Image: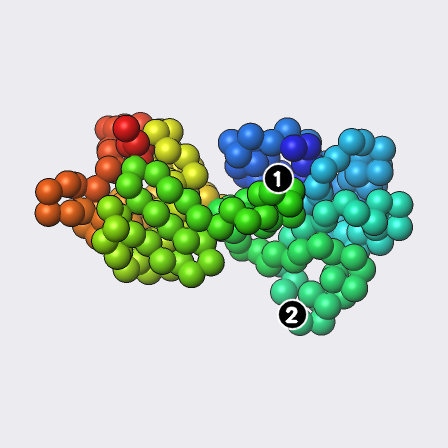
Amino acid sequence: MRILVVEDEPAIADFVQRGLRAEGHQVEVALDGITGQERALAGDVDLVVLDRMLPGRDGIEVLRNVRAEKPGLPVIVLTARAEVGDRVEGLDAGATDYLAKPFAFEELAARVRAHLRGPAQAKTTELDAGGIHADLLTREVTREGQSVHLSAKEFELLTHFLRHPNQVLSREQLLSAVWGYDFDPQTNIVEVYVGYLRRKLALPSSPAPIQTLRSVGYRLRVR
């Protein structure tokens, strides 16, 4: 899918662009409101990720102009302004969705998938790989039929592995996807939570299928 990211902070724009490209999308970035509106209206775009506070033209004004010409185009608004009144204003202006900064990339990616999926995909609420099953609605997890109780963040980490079976994921990718762009890159939280997952997914006769590739990252190994 073709996604336009309108974000004036280069670090965030790059973070979102790289993450969405890793999800398989074609991603273009605009760094100001005027350019963003022009590309949203002129280009063949499937979804827009729009910052609210932009130079040149405010994000709410861009949203109203885009909505007037392309009423069916999904627009996810990103903003540091997360008060109820701000969210209401954004939704009333035509936002399809609203996500407050700081955010975890995995949540943004899930919202993008939700707004891009077709009718046939809308029923896909379960993930299966390596004998592990996760229900995205009930947040229930089983391995080989055995129930596994996970915390909210453990569940997010596991679902990211399940969406990328047999793919090597670096700690930086996992940190960005699950904990967000603003998290301390020096933290060992990825290693800690991978350890939690391994212990909880392990069976008496079978260790968890999460491999460590030294100096590279981690992989959910699926036969």
Residue 165 is left or right of residue 201, and the answer is: right
**Residue sitting at 61 percent across and 56 percent down?**
99
Residue 18 versus residue 144 in the image, above or below? above
Residue 19 is left or right of residue 197, and the answer is: right
State which quarter of the image contains the C terminus: top left
Say whether residue 183 is visible.
no
**What count of labels does the image hold?**
2
- Residue 142 drawn at (x, y percent): 29, 52
Residue 59 is left or right of residue 162, and the answer is: right
Q: How is the image coloured?
A: rainbow
- Residue 92 drawn at (x, y percent): 79, 64
Q: Nearer the viewer, residue 55 or 104?
A: 104
Label 2: few (<14), some (14–19) or many (≥20) C-alpha neighbours in 10 Å: few
Q: Which mark is residue 83?
A: 2
Residue picked out by circle 1: 13
**Residue sitting at 24 percent across and 37 percent down?**
209
Callout 2 secondary element: loop
Q: Callout 1, which amino acid?
A: Ala
State which quarter of the image contains the N terminus: top right
- Mark 2 vs 1, N-terminal side: 1
Callout 1 secondary element: helix
Q: Nearer the viewer, residue 17 or 221?
A: 221
**Residue sitting at 28 percent across and 60 percent down?**
149
**Residue sitting at 79 percent across and 57 percent down?**
94
Label 2 with label 1: CB-CB less than 8 Å: no
State the CA–CA distance, disc 2 to disc 1. Answer: 23 Å
- Residue 106 drawn at (x, y percent): 49, 47
